[in-house]
Each structure stands twice: as structure tokens, then as C-alpha cells.
Amino acid sequence: MICILLVAGHGTVLETQIKNDDTGLYNYLTGVPKALLPGIGGKKILDFWWETVNMRQLFTEVYLVTNADKYKHFERWATASDFPVENIINDGSTTLEDRLGAVADLELAIRSRKLQDDVMVIAGDMLCADHNFDIGQVIRFFRSKPGELIIFYEMEESEKSSSRGIVEVCPDSNRITRFLEKPEEGRTSSRFASVVFYCIQKDTLPYLSDFLSLQTKAPDRSFGKFWERQINENLLEVFGMKLPTGFQLIGQVGLSDYTKWLTCFAITQEDKSARPITFRSYARVGLMGNPSDGFNGKTIAMSISNFWAEVTLIESQTLVLLPHPLNDPTEFGSLQDLFSISRKEGYLGGLRLLQATCKKFYQLCSKQGIALTKQNFTLKYDTNIPRQVGLAGSSAIVSATLKCLMKFYNLTDDDLPKPIRANFILNVETDELFITAGLQDRVVQVYEGLIYMDFSKKLMEEKGYGNYISMDMCGLPPFWLAYLSDPSDSGRIHSNIRQRWLSGEPLVVEAMETLAQLTDQARVALTDRDWNRLAQLMDQNFALRRSVYSDECLGPGNLKMVELAKQFGSAVKLPGSGGAVLGLCLDPTKLVEMRQAFQEAGCVFCVISPYNPTTSTASNQLSTHSAPKTQVLVM
């Protein structure tokens, strides 16, 4: 692949204002082309682009197209920056009036150097909020699509669509369906702005000459006009990839624009590198319908603030995953100590969850057409969710990690919608780590609160996800939770039910359908605040589950806790895959006595504190850098 950096523009407005500035602060920049002005951190704007594309394993050659007026500036820059001077192409223009136009500059490079490869084109005078993005990811995405590629970003509120080339993008295929060059306000609702950052197939290069033969004036030889014609008239198939960062100094800009965005982007970077990003995800309890979520059923589940997983991310020179001192032990007091810890805790802590999430996140963003910056970070986690009791402890770590990564890379719900995130978390566990898991845990940890979920086969096949509805959490009854102090692996509880369900065994199929029906009834009971009816449904949920799974599969520990709860007249069911029970005791006077009974039986007992994201005073995001108003994407 060939890379061509275009810096042949005549920045007359900026150059004139620098020359006439009365403060004298910018005298040293007089006559300096826009691409060679200082960028963030003192580097020249073009330095960032050269560092980004100076990769021999990706590009066989990198060319730079400039004009005759500024040629000497770029020649001097090339000798100081290890850029091959022979790869600088002079388009011969000396003024704005006699400029060739961007498309003609690209065509000149292709024609004069007889290029016959795919081409990446970048305007080297754009100021980017974060230049250090992964150019290899862009190329891989381009190779995966049967057409050309346009990079775009989401404009912030202060930017007007009439100053940019606006693209409308199909969210499913990433295909650009329409291109509008500087449209009037109201003509499109899209806020996606194209920049001069393209990948063009070698077979498409002749289209440049065809386009130029129809355009004789330089203003009409812009890439905006080129893509507007090719896309809107269906001459070329063009796809879009989003860079979740800001671009500025596009076209003719003045000194105030330059100083404003230089300061803004510098502050953003300093703030981002100085402060950590911390998110929590909460444990969840299944109120009704589980385990039918894995069998095209329906469930209601709730996030609880008693137990949580917390992940912290801070920018660093290298990418580091820090082991948890308790959950990922690498140092032991003795061989006996190692034996005891390994026997009780197993061998698999949370570190593998961080690593798998990062790997799948990169893969997901590539698939979704999102180009990430090449920033490194350090991740660490903490959690108080008890292991192996079916409270979604693993997915909580994955969920919190995903939140941190999205914030770090400036991704929003528009980039990765909630249903996609829930599926992603499940895939990290099932596809990458082979952890037995169901979808409801991930849905609740993404949406948070009290969630009704419908996983019907039709929905899952047509949309790839279910129907998820947040429910009112005000005035919930006193739920309680008890769990075994020394549980077994919760994933084993499912036994051979899936095989029986897939083979169409009537007992299992009918049970899952009935669980879905109970969930709909529980939804009505929750809405009507009919706690007696809800308690009855919870008992029915467990009885039905017991009839399908058998006592042997449920295990003596779970059955013991259920029977103990019933002695106090409490409704009870399994909130997850096993190791814990969830109860609803409508007689508050029995709670103290019941707690003592569970504790004497060797169980941990606690009253549940529901986590309501709409009323909670504790923010999910505990401490993070807050991007200034000018940051393009904020979560």
C-alpha cells in the first residue's frame, strides 16, 4: 500500500493573520505552512502524521505533495525528519488562485510516480485531538470491505455541518449511503464529518482522472465534490470507519481557530493522562424466570449494590494488567499455603477476564468500524462479589473493564449500543474463556437496575438480542440473600439441560415456556406492587426448576438453604446458577431470627440493597477525567 500526505493547500487566512498579529507572539511562525505549525506537545502537526504512517511493514512508500510556494519548507522538514526528500512532489502552484485542487494533487502523485497500488490519502495539515491511532487497524478494516474507505468523526455541538463534508452511514454494514458536501443546516441529521483520510483501491484510481475531466475549477476539484458524486450516483461502493477523536484546522482557518483547538486538545490530553478512570459494575440477582434466559425464555433480574466489581484504568507507557493480590496470587507463605488457597479459590482469577476483554474489545471495534488510538494503559481491578455463588462476578469484572475502555477511547452508546455490549460481555466469557454463562447477567450489568428481558427465538434471530425493558424500582419489598460460605463451581449446576432442551424433550421445553409465563406474571405483580403474588411466583419458579434439574443436580447445599427459608415462611428461589438463594420475607419480624438461623447453618446472610441507577447518589463512574466541553465524544 502507498501513503500520500497532501500538504499543498494555501492557508492564506491563517498566514495573513499570523503576519498581522499585533501581539508579536506569533512572529516566529510567519510564512510557516499550516502543516508545519506546532501541534500538541511542541511537535509539528505534520510530525504526528509522519510518525503514524512511517511503518515499512504497512506502506511500501510514503509521498508528500506540496506546492511550489512552500516547497523549501517541506524539503528542510524532510531532511530533519528522516523523510525521503525524493518523495516530495511539487504541484507547481504558488497562490490560492492557481491551486490544482486536492483531487488533482492526488492524481499528480499517482501519475508522476506511476503508482499501481492501493492508496491511503491523508491531509497532513489537520490538527487531531489524538494522532496516535492504530493505522494498521484502519488498513485491516479497509481490506475487509469490498470498496473504498472514508474516515469520519462525530462533530461536537459548536461545529456546523455546513463547514464539513457530512456522511450518512449504515450502522449494520458501515456503508456510506449518502455524502453531502457542506450541506445547509437541516438537510441531514447526521453529525458524522468526513476528513481527508481515505483508502482507495488501485482499481478505483482511474475514477480520479474521469472526475477531473469534468471539473475545470480548483474549488470543484475537492474530495468532498468527488465523493459526493461517486457515492450519491452509486458509482463506487464506499464504507466508513469512525475515529472517536476530534479533527480541526480543516480548510481555510484563522489564528483564533488554531490557538483555540491547540489549547483545547492539549488540555484534553493532559487531563486524560493525569487522572484515572474508574467504573463499577454490580452483582445481580435473578428475581424471576431464570434459567430460561439461555433457552429463549424471559427473566427479570436486578442489580444490587451490596456486591460489586471495580476496574481502574490509567494511561501508561506500556499496556499493563495488574494482578489482584487476593484473586490472582503469585506469592505464597508456603507450599501448604499454596495448596489451601488453590483448593479453595481455584486457579483462575480476574486477570484472564481483563486480558480477554481487551482482546475482544479491539476485535469488536474493528468489526464495528471504529479506529482506536494507540494509547497504552494500566488496568487493575477489585471485587467483593463472592465467588461461585451465581451472582455474575466474572461478568461484572468484564462489564466494568468495558466501561473503562469505552471512556478511555471516547466511545458512546452510539458507537457500541447497550444490546451489543451485553452480547460482547457474554462472548468474552463463553467464546474466549469457555465459561458457562447466560445472557441475562450481562444485560442487567449493562442496563442496570430492575430489568425485564425477553429472549424469544424470533427476537434473537432477527435482531441478535432480546427485548430489554427497565422497570420502576421505587418501593420494592425487602429481599434477602444467603449464600454458601464454601460453594462449588456455579457453572456446573446446569448439567445436561441444554442438550435435553435442544433435543426437544417435552419436560424441559415446557418448563422453559412456563418460566417465561411466570416472568410475565411477575412483571404485572411488580408493577401492581402485589408482593404476595410475587412471593408465590418466586416459589413456583424454584419448584419448576427443581422438577427439571433434580435434587441431585441442585445439590444439598442449595436445597438446605431453600428448606431453611421455608421454615420462616419466606419465598425463596435461586438467584443464579447455584450457591446462593434469594428470598422475599413479607414478615419483617422474622428477618432477624432467619438471619441467625442461616448464620448458624454456616451461610452468609444479608439484606439486599437494590442498585437504582436513576436515583443512586453514588455515581457508577467513581473517579475519572472529565473531558472539557470541546472533547468530541463524551460518555
Image (cartoon, helix red, strand yellow):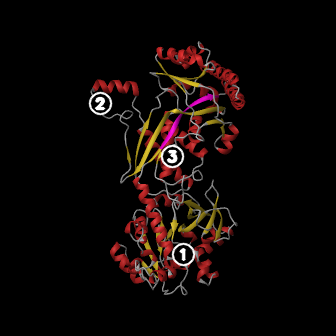
Disc nearer the start of the sequence (1/3)? 1
Q: Determine the residue located farthest toward the top in the rendered image.
A: 567
What numbered label is drawn on residue 251? 1
User: Furthest residue to the left?
Assistant: 334
Tell me residue 480's x, y (percent).
56, 24
Question: Mark 1: which amino acid?
Answer: Gly
Q: Secondary structure at mark 3?
A: helix
- Between residue 69 and residue 106, name the one nearer to us: 69
Image label count = 3
Residue at mark 3: 403
- Along the polypeptide, which appears first: circle 2 or circle 3? 2
Left or right: residue 218 versus residue 255 is right
Give coordinates of residue 1: x percent, y percent: 47, 66
Question: Which segment is the magenta one?
Answer: 279-289
Task: Give the secondary structure at mark 2.
Answer: loop
Asked if the residue at tag 3 contacts the one at tag 1, i.e. Cβ–Cβ closer than 8 Å, the answer is: no
**Visible in this render: residue 371?**
yes
Spatial distance from mark 2 to mark 3, Cα to Cα? 32 Å
- At numbered mark 1, what does the secondary structure look like: helix, strand or loop? loop
